[in-house]
Amino acid sequence: MHSQSMKRVVLAGGGHAHLAVLADWARKPLPAARRWLVTSSRYTAYSGMVPGWLAGFYSADDLMIDLAPLAERAGAELVLADVIGLDAEKRKLALSTGETLEFDLLSLATGGETDTSALAVAGQRLLPVRPMCGFIAEWRGRIATDTGSPPQEIVVVGGGAAGVELAFAICVAHRRAAGMGRVSIVTPEERFLAGHDERVQALAKCALLERGITMHFAHAVGTEGGLLLSNGRFLAADCIVAATGSRAPLWLAQSGLACTPEGFVAVGPDMRSTSHDAIFAAGDIIERADRRLERSGVHAVKAGPVLAANLRAALGQGAVQRYKPRRRTLYLLALGDRRAIFSWGPIVGTGRWAWRLKDWIDRSFVRRYTSHGSAAPGATTTRRGKP
């Protein structure tokens, strides 16, 4: 039973934006509110460091953030389960454990899903990059062990920053494990580092050529033996890494929330649903209704403090804030050899200094959420769902 005065606040997803919310609650507990964190795994991997882990520069512990102590310090109950449905009108969240969580205030940061529909026929050869923890575990099984025969032909499908960084890192990891073999990247040319400065694109292409990573500018369809490209070529592949970008979770279509034509949650600059005032969202699950925003982890991280403030404001604490992306965004593209490409507005450069900057930023982010502190009043270590 809940007291009528106690508000039920649910964070669905362990995404980067919710890390800032949990930290905010730990610093200053929410008054008269019972809190939950629903997440599919106790651990969340900081995506910016995954290519470095693949290349051997980090251990898995370096990039993993344990959500259990974060939730405890925030006074939130940790529920280990997937979100499989939402009734926005009735304010009910359906979980994979069979439970239903009722809420007065909900924040969604479950992340998108990797769109593998065009590649699905490839079957066991297919390795989606999301969920990230699943990718890490599967990669360990395929390549990062000393037994068995590693795949010789690895193809990365997707030309965004994630796909390009993964291609560089996989090239290093592949050669370390197998000593031979080929790595390729497949993407329509107009999607290769789309939104980045042309000089960044040129530097990345040169670096790919230097590493012997073959670029195929085409669309791809999965087959039982590899990929059929839109230019008519067949590309054999033992492992197809799908970095094809995010699609909206399918359960959103039946949620009653206002969504964009692509199925993402439509939110305003305050990160609140345009149709339901009790629901907020951030990260890859959203699209802004007022402006176009690149789908990037940078925005999820930067929007986190705004989301935290607005959840408080919805409970009568403080003023509503708006997330205003900076005019210039800092991008650091790892090249797999302790070098990176730096871009900030018109300033573009490359070198080890850029990698060191990226390494410092990434380690600082993880450290922020892995340092220990005292738990907030009302904290609970109760956990339900799958282990």
Image: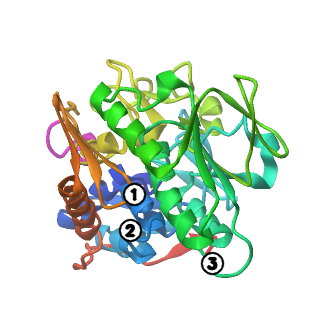
- The stretch in magenta equals 307-319
Residue 80 in view here: no
Q: Is residue 64 left or right of residue 354?
A: right
The mark lying in front, picked from 3 and 1, is 1
| Residue type (three-letter) at the residue carrying disc 1 | Gly
Residue carrying label 1:
336
> Percent position (x, y) of residue 201?
36, 32
Q: Is residue 303 left or right of residue 188?
A: left
| Residue type (three-letter) at the residue carrying disc 2 | Leu
SS type, badge 1: loop
| Residue type (three-letter) at the residue carrying disc 3 | Thr
Among the two numbered marks 3 and 1 on one chain, the one whose residue lies closer to the N terminus = 3
- Tell me what residue is drawn at x 29 percent, y 55 percent: 339
Tell how many labels: 3
The answer for how far apart the CA atoms under marks 3 and 1 are is 20 Å
> Percent position (x, y) of residue 164?
46, 44
Q: Residues within 10 Å of mark 3 (few under 14, many from 20)?
A: few
> Percent position (x, y) of residue 266?
44, 26
Among the two numbered marks 3 and 2 on one chain, the one whose residue lies closer to the N terminus = 2
Residue carrying label 3:
145
- Where residue 63 is drawn, which disc sits there? 2
Q: Is residue 250 above or below residue 3?
A: above
Q: Relative to the observer, which residue lies in front, 39 or 225? A: 225
Answer whether labels 1 and 2 touch (C-beta < 8 Å).
no
